[in-house]
Image: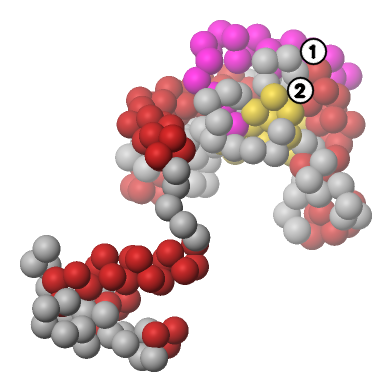
Amino acid sequence: GKFDWSTGKHPAFTEPDTSYGGLRWGIDLPEMLAPLAYILRMRTVPLRNLGGCMSPDNAWMALQGIETLPMRMEKHCENAMKTATHLSKHPKVAWVRYPGLGRDPMNKLQKKYLQGKGGPLVVIGLKGGREAGEKMINSLKLFSHVANVGDAKSLAIHPASTTHSQLSDEEQIESGLAPELVRLSVGIEHIDDILIDLDQALAQVE
C-alpha cells in the first residue's frame, strides 16, 4: 500500500527496533521497500515472537467465531444483567458485583467504556462463606465447573477452594480474594434455565 508509516504516529515503525540492529521500519527501508514496511515487520517480528500462521481449518473456525461475536456478546450481557439483578435479591447472597448494576462502583465506567454493556462476568459472595461457595459450585447442573471465562456455555468457579487453594486463608484475603466469592461467566443459554440452575444450587446451601 501507500500508507506513510514514517509520520511518528506509530512508534513501532519509527523507533529503533533493537532486535534488528536499530532498524526503523517506517524510515530506514530502501525506497522500493518502504510501501512494504508493515508486512515486512509483520513477517519478521510478530512471526518470530508468536510463531507460524494458523492452519486454514483453524483460521476458518476462528473466523466463524469472530463473525458471530457481536451477536453472542449481546446475549451474554443481557443474561448477565438479569442474573446479577436476580441474585442481588436472593436471601443467601451477601453481595453482587456486576458493572451493569446501578449501585456498582464500576457502573459509570462501564457506561463510558462499554456503552452500557456490563459483560458476561458476575461475581457474588455467599452469606455462608467458604463452605457455602463449595456447596453451591458442586450443586450446579447447567453451569460447568471450570476456570475459563467467556465461553458460550455458562461457567462457574469458587476460587478459594480451587484456583487459589494452595494459598492460606490469610494469603487469599491479602490478595483480595474473599472466601465466599463465586465467579460466574454467564453464557447464552435461555435465561430461565440459567436462573433455575442457580436457584436450585443455592437451595442446597445451608
Quarter-of-image position of residue 19: bottom left
Instruction: List x then y, in percent, for residue 14.
Output: 26, 82
Lower position in the chain sequence, tag 2 or tag 1: 2
Residue under circle 1?
203
- Residue 47 in the image: above or below residue 179: below
Q: Are marks 2 and 1 in contact (CB under 8 Å)?
A: no
Residue at image location 85% in from the left, 40% down from the top = 161
Q: Which residues are magenta?
A: 185-206
**Left or right relative to 111: residue 1:** left
Left or right, 140 with reference to 72: right
Q: Is residue 202 rendered magenta in the image? A: yes
CA–CA distance between discs 2 and 1? Answer: 9 Å
Q: Which residue is mark 2?
A: 92
Q: Nearer the viewer, residue 13 or 94?
A: 13
State the colouring used for the structure image.
Answer: secondary structure
Determine if the magenta segment contains residue 164.
no
Q: Residue at x 32, y 87 (%)?
A: 23
> Looking at numbered disc 2 in the image, what kind of residue is underneath it?
Lys
Write down the quadrant of residue 111 in the picture: top left
Is disc 2 surrounded by few (<14), some (14 to 19) or many (20+) residues within 10 Å? some
Image spot of residue 78 (x, y percent): 44, 23
Q: Nearer the viewer, mark 2 or mark 1?
A: 1
Name the residue at 52% across, 11% down.
Answer: 190
